[in-house]
Image (tube, rainbow, N blue to C red):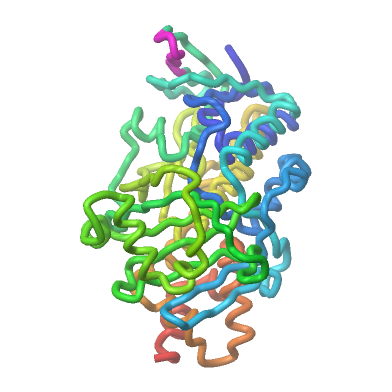
């Protein structure tokens, strides 16, 4: 047996889970297909995530890394603008976080987990999985094509968009979200000092199609991550290739375009499509799926890393108990609790695209400060706070406020 726990994937969920398990005294092997540092999208963290970084013993590593601080978000639609300060929320907890270069962030978390005792193996691809309640095993192929068998007492899949176990075990199921794609890049923004609050991201709605939206995420060292999200057929009319489409769409973005007037390219334009996913089950005999390996909704509220870290925290505690001879109820203690927050975010994603949340953001008609504080809590990642009615019954309250606002 190679380790008590094998973690597939060294992204945030994998490294945080590995750190938590190593701190609990278990032997942990992390298998990662790529080599670090490697580029990844998903740079805007939510304050709630800081709790789980702290729990894993990795918060100080992140604090000392020099990332761009983040305290909120600005939403724009034409010249309408609404700012959300994550420090002014109804839920207690962190109100600030970071906007991170993921190649640096992921490597910092991996090194931190390694410092705590986890072992990382890069250039390793999992090609087969045999579930077993006591000794699940994996077939792992290295970059020379040599295969080996790895057996553990438990396996956690944190492979993100690779969705390793979901694909190998035929767990994928259709998602209700329509097909969308994102086109993105990094730029040296050259924004004059004081022209924009770099502590806030900007989410902009396209003036001609409210289903198309943009992100603008200032990073450290004068970089900004920019991207656009929409249905492929809606983006295709803007040019013959992704570069043309991104340039043409940014030209329609208003403030974002004005902020980028002096920008120069820092990397090639990339794209991700078909990212929304769902599985029939997050757990099975000797394994569990974390974060994007199980379900991903949409990038609009930057919920991906938050859900990933929440899943790592929940699963790690149950793995420790199970390997200590207990019999935790994975459905009641992992899948359902995790799912409650996912359903909250799902309601907000649905509300964003059907227009109800956009109405709420730009026209909150009654008790605006109280309502805004509760919505801000969700936008800050506190999607598991059942004291908040916008968490407890998100669709009901969003629709109610949207109707009051006309």
Query: On screen, 380 above or below 101?
Result: below
Q: Residue at x 35, y 28 (%)?
A: 168
Mark count = 0
Front residue of this view, candidates 183 and 16: 183
Residue 133 screen position, x and y as percent: 50, 25
Q: Residue at 50% of width from left, 73% of height from top?
A: 75
Relative vertical location of residue 394 with respect to residue 232 in this rendering, above or below:
below
Image spot of residue 252 (x, y percent): 36, 70
Residue found at x 48% / y 70% = 258
Q: Quadrant of the N terminus?
A: top right
Q: What's the residue at 61%, 18% (across, down)?
A: 3
42, 259: nearer the viewer: 259
Residue 313 visible in the current orientation: yes
Q: Is residue 76 magenta?
A: no
In the depicted structure, whether residue 279 falls above or below residue 387: above
Indicate the position of residue 251 as horizontal and vertical percent values: 37, 67
Picture quadrant of residue 152 = top right
Q: In which quarter of the image is the C terminus?
A: bottom left
**In the orientation shown, which residue stands out farthest toward the front?**
262
Q: Is residue 384 visible?
A: no
What is the magenta range?
138-145
Q: Residue 254 appears at what percent x and percent y? A: 43, 73
In the foreground, 347 or 321? 347
| Depicted 141 relative to depicted 112: above or below | above
């Amino acid at each position: 047996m190679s380790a008590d726990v094998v973690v597939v994937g060294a992204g945030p969920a994998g490294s945080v889970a590995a750190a938590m398990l190593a701190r609990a005294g278990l032997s942990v092997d992390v298998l990662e297909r790529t080599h670090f540092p490697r580029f990844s999208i998903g740079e805007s963290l939510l304050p709630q995530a800081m709790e789980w970084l702290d729990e894993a013993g990795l918060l100080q590593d992140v604090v000392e890394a020099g990332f761009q601080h983040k305290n909120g978000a600005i939403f724009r639609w034409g010249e309408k603008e609404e700012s959300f300060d994550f420090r002014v929320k109804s839920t207690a907890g962190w109100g600030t976080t970071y906007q991170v270069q993921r190649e640096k962030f992921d490597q910092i978390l991996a090194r931190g987990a390694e410092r705590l005792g986890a072992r990382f193996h890069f250039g390793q691809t999992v090609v087969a999985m045999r579930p077993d309640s006591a000794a699940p095993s994996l077939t792992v192929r290295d970059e020379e094509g040599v295969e080996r068998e790895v057996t553990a007492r438990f396996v956690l899949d944190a492979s993100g968009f690779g969705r390793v176990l979901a694909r190998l075990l035929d767990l994928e199921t259709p998602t209700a979200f329509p097909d969308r794609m994102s086109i993105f890049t990094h730029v040296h923004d050259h924004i004059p000092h004081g022209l924009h609050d770099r502590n806030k991201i900007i989410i902009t709605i396209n003036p001609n199609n409210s289903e198309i939206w943009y992100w603008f995420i200032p990073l450290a060292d004068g970089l900004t991550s920019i991207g656009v999200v929409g249905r492929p057929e809606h983006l295709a009319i803007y040019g013959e290739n992704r570069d043309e489409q991104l340039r043409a769409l940014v030209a329609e973005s208003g403030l974002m375009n004005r902020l980028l007037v002096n920008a120069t390219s820092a990397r090639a334009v990339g794209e991700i499509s078909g990212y929304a996913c769902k599985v029939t089950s997050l757990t099975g005999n000797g394994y569990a799926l974390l974060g994007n390996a199980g379900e991903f909704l949409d990038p609009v509220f930057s919920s991906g890393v938050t859900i990933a870290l929440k899943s790592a925290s929940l699963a790690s505690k149950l793995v420790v108990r199970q390997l200590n001879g207990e019999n935790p109820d994975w459905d009641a203690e992992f899948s359902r609790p995790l799912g409650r927050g996912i359903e909250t975010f799902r309601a907000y994603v649905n509300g964003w695209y059907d227009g109800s949340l956009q109405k709420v953001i730009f026209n909150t008609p009654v008790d605006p400060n109280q309502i805004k504080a509760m919505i801000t809590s969700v936008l800050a990642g506190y999607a598991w706070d059942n004291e908040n009615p916008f968490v407890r019954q998100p669709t009901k309250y969003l629709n109610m406020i949207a109707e009051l606002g006309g």
